[in-house]
């Protein structure tokens, strides 16, 4: 067994050396390697590992406490060292920052705090020189209320921009109730005295919804998309686009519909017409990644966004696997397995999915799906990375998770920045709700848990800024940080690099068929990935206790360990009948 582990480690070192030395090419060239035989429709965006950067929290270069583009540029070699292929960057456009850049006031310029267009050009060039692609956020379900279009639109009922947004004249009475995600009163219609009318905002009152019914607005958006694509960016993640089409007869929706909001706001009457038009006008002309953030509320609905025959987008990023409540422990592993297996069965022959456990709208992956207790945090972080990097679909990995960053768990509302958390608190305060219980819940669920500054090293503020960080740094940075982990061959970070390298060198982990085993096992998630002659068995113990995974006959041929997250002293024990796993142990076998 020991010999095998040494051999496997040697292979992995060889793979990672090969990758770190790989010369800078912009595209990941699909090769004609016979291991890819029988793969239909290969595409760079299926083979890429995507790393998400929340720019506000990544690296501050000028000491104002806010991350910026020059900060990212200074960390390009770190990004390259991870072995990732593409970066999804949260919005960097001009914005008054009511929702940290998701309220855009100029789609063709860079937010002042983040830098200039020259910085952007340098960033794009630096990424491409290192063979890393750039996917930008496109936020066009709504704009900022400070956008020129909205200023014009609200100025008079006859202004040419009036129909860029949804208005309701107050003389017709109050518009039909619409629930808002971020409004202090949860009301999506806001009265505007200037023209005695209401405008619609599904998110905050500073994020008015754009009117996609208007062909002029649609053309403006396509021009913006071309502006960035012609600069050479490699795709867009379409923010909240599933909400873009509205039934503008504004029918009354059933009471309590907000508990199932995607069903009522997603999939509006013309949504797919708009996407097909967008594809014809823009996407069909470029070889880029196009991601449907939010993709309905079932695999069948998600398929509609990315079925190649429909010519819309190419990756469906659905929410079912993160909308599981507070923690995986509460939700149950069996239910979780069912979600992935249900989606995979619909997507096995066509269409393509994103695989992720975290993003900037979520608490930390480790705190929700793993166990951030000191005993288990390293092993469970590594196990979660193993899961994301060995499933079928493009992995989207959130910055900081490669270090095992965890929830900060603020005690006071003043520590929070997030418009969602702050406005819901305000709402509760005004209606006499239980504020203590709310704050307790937010320790586990607030979006700010995932947004605390990146932990670079053990110097003050984790090396993120020399100034006062816009959001507090997690005090665990003295031990959880990139510099310390780079020097530790056993670290969560170095494991992440290994699993990325393994995925990149294994066509079966990218395209191979997924098959689930032992669905009712409440601790172990086990599956195979098979393509031609390449076969992997992935066994993950999602629990705090040791356990045995009983091998069915058809899995007994998997005897060689490719990678495990425990060092050899506690190596996995494989007998003819079972695999004995340590708490949160992951093992990949061939
Ligand atoms: O989120 C879209 C979305 O559907 C939200 O419901 C999300 O679940 C929300 O974060 C709940 O708190 C996108 C962005 O990812 C998010 O950061 C933005 O705030 C939102 O759109 C508005 O642009």
Image (tube, grey):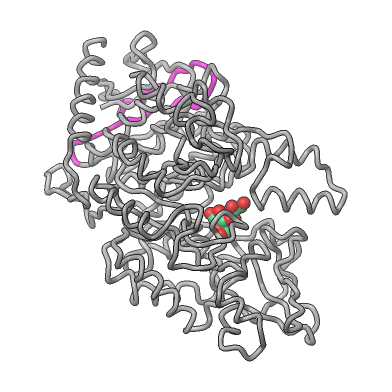
Q: Is residue 109 left or right of residue 501?
A: right
Q: Residue 360: x percent and y percent?
A: 53, 46
Q: Residue 135: x percent and y percent?
A: 37, 55
Quadrant occupied by the N terminus: top left
Q: Quadrant of ligand 1?
A: bottom right
Residue 90 makes an appearance in the image:
yes
Q: Is residue 12 left or right of residue 294?
A: left
Residue span colored magenta = 532-555
Residue 310 makes an appearance in the image:
no
Q: Residue 22: x percent and y percent?
A: 17, 38
Quadrant occupied by the C terminus: top left
Which residue is more in the foreground, 423 or 322?
423
Which residue is more in the foreground, 540 or 490?
490
Q: What residue appears at the point 26 percent right and 20 percent down from the top-left corner?
A: 559
Query: Eyeballing the image, is 342 above or below 379?
Result: below
Which residue is more in the foreground, 126 or 207?
126
Query: Eyeballing the image, is 436 above or below 586?
Result: below
Q: What residue appears at the point 40 percent right and 37 percent down from the top-left corner?
A: 516
């Amino acid at each position: 067994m020991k010999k095998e582990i040494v051999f496997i480690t040697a292979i992995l070192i060889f793979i990672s050396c090969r990758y770190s030395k790989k010369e800078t090419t912009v595209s990941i060239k699909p090769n004609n390697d016979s291991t890819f035989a029988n793969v239909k429709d290969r595409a760079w965006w299926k083979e890429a590992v995507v790393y998400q950067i929340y720019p506000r929290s990544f690296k501050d270069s000028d000491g104002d406490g806010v991350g910026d583009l020059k900060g990212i540029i200074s960390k390009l070699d770190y990004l390259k060292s991870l072995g990732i292929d593409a970066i999804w960057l949260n919005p960097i456009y001009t914005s008054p920052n009511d929702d940290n850049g998701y309220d855009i006031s100029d789609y063709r310029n860079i937010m002042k705090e983040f830098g200039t267009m020259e910085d952007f050009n340098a960033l794009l060039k630096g990424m491409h020189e290192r063979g890393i692609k750039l996917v930008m956020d496109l936020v066009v379900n709504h704009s900022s209320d400070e956008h020129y279009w909205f200023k014009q639109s609200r100025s008079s009922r006859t202004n040419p921009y009036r129909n860029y947004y949804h208005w309701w004249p107050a003389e017709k009475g109050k518009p039909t109730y619409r629930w808002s995600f971020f409004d202090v009163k949860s009301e999506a219609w806001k009265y505007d005295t200037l023209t005695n009318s209401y405008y619609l905002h599904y998110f905050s009152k500073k994020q008015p919804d754009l009117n996609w019914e208007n062909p002029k607005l649609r053309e403006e958006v396509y021009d913006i998309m071309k502006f960035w694509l012609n600069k050479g960016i490699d795709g867009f993640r379409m923010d909240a686009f599933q909400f873009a089409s509205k039934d503008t007869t504004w029918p009354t929706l059933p009471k309590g519909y907000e508990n199932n909001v995607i069903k009522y706001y997603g999939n509006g009457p013309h949504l797919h017409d708009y996407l097909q038009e967008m594809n014809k006008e823009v996407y069909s002309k470029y070889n880029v990644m196009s991601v449907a953030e939010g993709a309905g509320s079932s695999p069948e609905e998600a398929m509609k966004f990315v079925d190649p025959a429909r010519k819309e987008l190419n990756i469906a990023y659905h929410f079912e696997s993160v909308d599981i409540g507070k923690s995986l422990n509460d939700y149950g592993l069996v239910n979780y397995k069912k979600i992935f297996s249900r989606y995979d069965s619909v997507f096995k022959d066509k269409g393509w999915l994103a695989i992720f456990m975290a993003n900037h709208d979520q608490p930390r992956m480790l705190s929700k799906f793993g166990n951030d207790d000191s005993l288990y945090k390293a092993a469970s972080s590594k196990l979660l990375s193993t899961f994301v990097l060995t499933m079928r679909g493009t992995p989207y990995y959130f910055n900081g998770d490669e270090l095992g960053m965890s929830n900060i768990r603020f005690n006071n509302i003043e520590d929070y920045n997030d418009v969602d958390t702050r406005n819901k608190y305000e709402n509760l305060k005004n209606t006499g709700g239980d504020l203590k219980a709310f704050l307790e819940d937010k320790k586990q669920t607030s979006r700010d848990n995932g947004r605390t500054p990146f932990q670079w090293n053990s110097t003050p503020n984790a090396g993120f800024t020399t100034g006062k960080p816009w959001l507090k740094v997690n005090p665990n940075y003295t031990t959880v940080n990139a510099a310390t982990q780079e020097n530790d061959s056993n670290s969560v970070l170095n494991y992440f690099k290994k699993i990325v390298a393994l995925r990149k060198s294994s066509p079966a982990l990218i395209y191979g068929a997924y098959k689930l085993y032992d669905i009712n096992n409440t601790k172990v998630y086990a599956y195979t990935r098979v393509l031609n002659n390449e076969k992997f068995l992935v066994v993950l113990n999602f629990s705090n206790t040791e356990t045995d995974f009983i091998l069915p006959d058809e899995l007994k041929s998997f005897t060689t360990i490719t990678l495990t997250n425990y060092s050899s002293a506690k190596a996995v024990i494989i007998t003819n009948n079972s695999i004995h796993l340590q708490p949160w142990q992951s093992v990949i076998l061939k």
